[in-house]
Image (cartoon, rainbow, N blue to C red):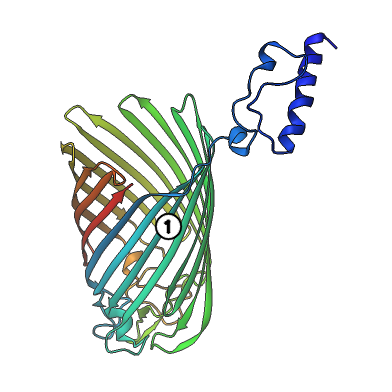
Amino acid sequence: MSFRSLQFVAALLTILPRAYAGEPLSGPLSGPLSGPLAQPVPGPLSDEAVLGEPVPFHIESVRARYTNYDQYGHGFQSQAGPLGGPGSERVTVEQPQIEVVAKQGKFTHRLWIPVDVVTAASPDAVDVISTASYRNEAGSIDLASTYQYDPKTAYQLRAGVHLEEELRSWNFGLGVSRSFADDNAVVSFSVNQVLDWFDQFTVHGVRQSRVFRSSTNGNLSLSQLLSPTTIANVSYGVTVQTGVLGNTWNSVPLDDGTIGAEKLPRLRHRHALAGRIAQYLPWHGAIHGLYRLYVDNWGLWGNTLEVELYQRIARWLYLRANYRFHHQTGIDFFTTRASVDAPLRSADSDLAPFFAHTVGGLAVVDLPFRGSLNQLHLDFGYDRYFRSNDLHVNVFTCALGFRF
């Protein structure tokens, strides 16, 4: 062993007993050592000195949102109309929600709590719940946490519960994302599981038993920076559902002039492939494009095209205009007049062939502040959804948020 190595070992033997005894190490080392090892040691050998100052838990942002959904139209699955339909699909949803984002060291937590107050004509027509008007309150608690393992790798964990009068639902999710090529590309993978436990009704509104539904989902996506002003993303998702896959009270008009229960398979495979691109525009704007292809083993094919145009008006104000087009073929066993002995049948308008359009806009105000409040956020939006099989929805939304 060299003389310098002996010096280093001797220094450690001098420092460590004092450190374990809790004595300060700010004074000079005693003994024959000289040079750099004899200089004062700054500060005690504490956890903070070794690991750095701990980052406390703190709230990053709080946002409250209110959304109103007003749907009207007609569908053959609804009994809120003449025998054999079509019946009213009138639904009104009032949805307040709150979102809290917090940081805790390498963890980022997002707590989301939406509450839905739903008034719907179709279940009320079959007296699914004996009230003057079918009014159902529902609420969810969803917590998602992201752990930034290193500058390139992040892990996600998500869990939530949804409660309403005739349904209980639980969801769990895991994910990981990693960046490559000097952070110009990001690959993400996630798996999610949803378990539903709900009441089974006859088409006449009689509660029979409790039934289950399971939905298992996996997603893989790649984001790539194509240029300093262009980013693209491609993703694939697959969902496998088993169990009772309808709401159990949907009716189907039969060819003998009566109505019967909806009959659905107990297994459904759903696949979605999507591509997105975002391009900066030189007049302080941006354009986002999306194309999505959907297919499942019930015979339904869907194509979706969406365009969003963003324009900054001032440093504190920007606007968004959006348009979405969707077309689907309908499932193989969709019908508005089924035979009495048909093994599979559904008259659900959501599973029918149709064209759908959504047109909307959003105004966003972000006001900077000094001190503990960094930013005040306000937004106001409206979307108009309408489709070819007589369904229309107006969606109003507004939000108030604070960033700390």
Of 310 and 372, which appears nearest the observer? 372
Give the residue at x 36% y 57%.
99
Give the residue at x 42% y 57%.
111
Of 65 and 190, which appears nearest the observer? 65
Badge 1 density bin: few <14, some 14–19, many ≥20, Cα 10 Å:
some
Q: Tell me if 73 is positioned left or right of 159 in this view.
A: left
Q: Give the SS element for disc 1.
A: strand
Q: Tell me if 343 is positioned left or right of 16 in this view.
A: left
Of 278 and 403, which appears nearest the observer? 403
Give the residue at x 25% y 63%.
67
Of 177 and 353, which appears nearest the observer? 177
Q: Name the residue at the right extreme.
A: 1
Q: Is residue 285 above or below residue 237?
A: above
Asked which quadrant contains residue 387, the reply is bottom left
x and y percentages locating residue 220 in the rendered image: 50, 43
**Kind of residue indicated by mark 1:** Leu
Specify the quadrant that holds the N terminus: top right
Q: What residue does disc 1 label?
A: 111
x and y percentages locating residue 386 in the rendered image: 21, 60
x and y percentages locating residue 142 in the rendered image: 45, 60
